[in-house]
């Protein structure tokens, strides 16, 4: 199912978005201070090209202030343009019947295009149950699982996580 989703994604939006990221990366590499942003653009190009089967998580042990500074600078080095590309493509996909799940995924990816620093793309199969569902455990949390077709796998990870209950103290009568 991942492969089918990725092929459909590639044909309808992935190739164009990946080209946009590659162009942004090349333009950022053209100026010396833009090299870190070009590297980020190339990483996101791969994710925009073939997103199903991968998830975006917060990088563990990342300094939030440096990530925020990088994201602010990223906005001016092409992040705004790539975010608009995701939103525009997402709306176009939602207007079609077959593209609704892809359009929703594309709009979720717009958040990553706006603020990519401090996050990393990992295979869904490598996620630990503690990283599923936005739970902050051991320094990382799921920020976005773009593939809509991966819900079954995510549900299996959640089911494998042991249930926890709060211990209640004595009740006052």
Image (spheres, rainbow, N blue to C red):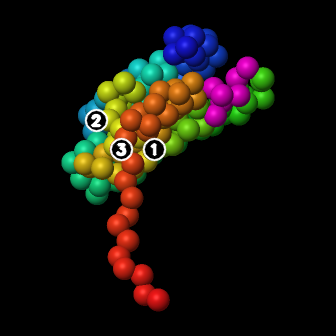
Identify whether 170 is placed above or below 73: below
Observer able to see residue 144:
yes
Residue 122, image x, y percentages: 35, 29
Observer able to see residue 66:
no
Residues tagged 3 and 1 counted as in contact (Cβ below 8 A): no
The residue sitting at 53% across, 27% down in the picture is 152
Which is in the foreground here, disc 2 or disc 1? 1
Q: Which residue is mark 1?
A: 133
Magenta stretch in the rendered image: 98-104
Main SS type for the magenta part? helix
Query: How far apart, in angstroms, are the residues tagged by discs 3 and 1?
Result: 14 Å
The residue sitting at 55% across, 19% down in the picture is 14
Q: Which residue is mark 3?
A: 162
Of 21 and 140, nearer the camera is 140
The question of residue 156 being in magenta is answered with no
Query: From the image, which quarter does the N terminus lie in?
Result: top right
The residue sitting at 56% across, 38% down in the picture is 108
């Amino acid at each position: 199912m991942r492969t089918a989703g990725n092929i459909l994604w590639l044909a309808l939006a992935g190739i164009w978005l990946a080209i946009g990221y590659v162009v942004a990366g090349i333009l950022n590499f053209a100026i010396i201070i833009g090299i870190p942003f070009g590297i980020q653009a190339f990483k996101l190009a791969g994710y925009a090209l073939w997103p199903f089967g991968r998830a975006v998580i917060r990088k563990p042990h990342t300094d939030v202030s440096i990530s925020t500074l990088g994201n602010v600078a990223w906005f001016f080095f092409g992040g705004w343009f790539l975010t608009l590309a995701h939103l525009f493509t997402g709306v176009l996909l939602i207007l079609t019947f077959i593209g609704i799940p892809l359009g929703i995924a594309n709009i979720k990816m717009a958040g990553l295009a706006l603020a990519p620093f401090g996050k990393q793309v990992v295979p869904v199969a490598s996620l630990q149950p503690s990283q599923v569902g936005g739970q902050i455990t051991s320094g990382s949390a799921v920020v976005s699982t773009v593939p809509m077709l991966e819900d079954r796998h995510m549900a299996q990870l959640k089911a494998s996580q042991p249930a926890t209950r709060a211990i209640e103290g004595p009740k006052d009568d």
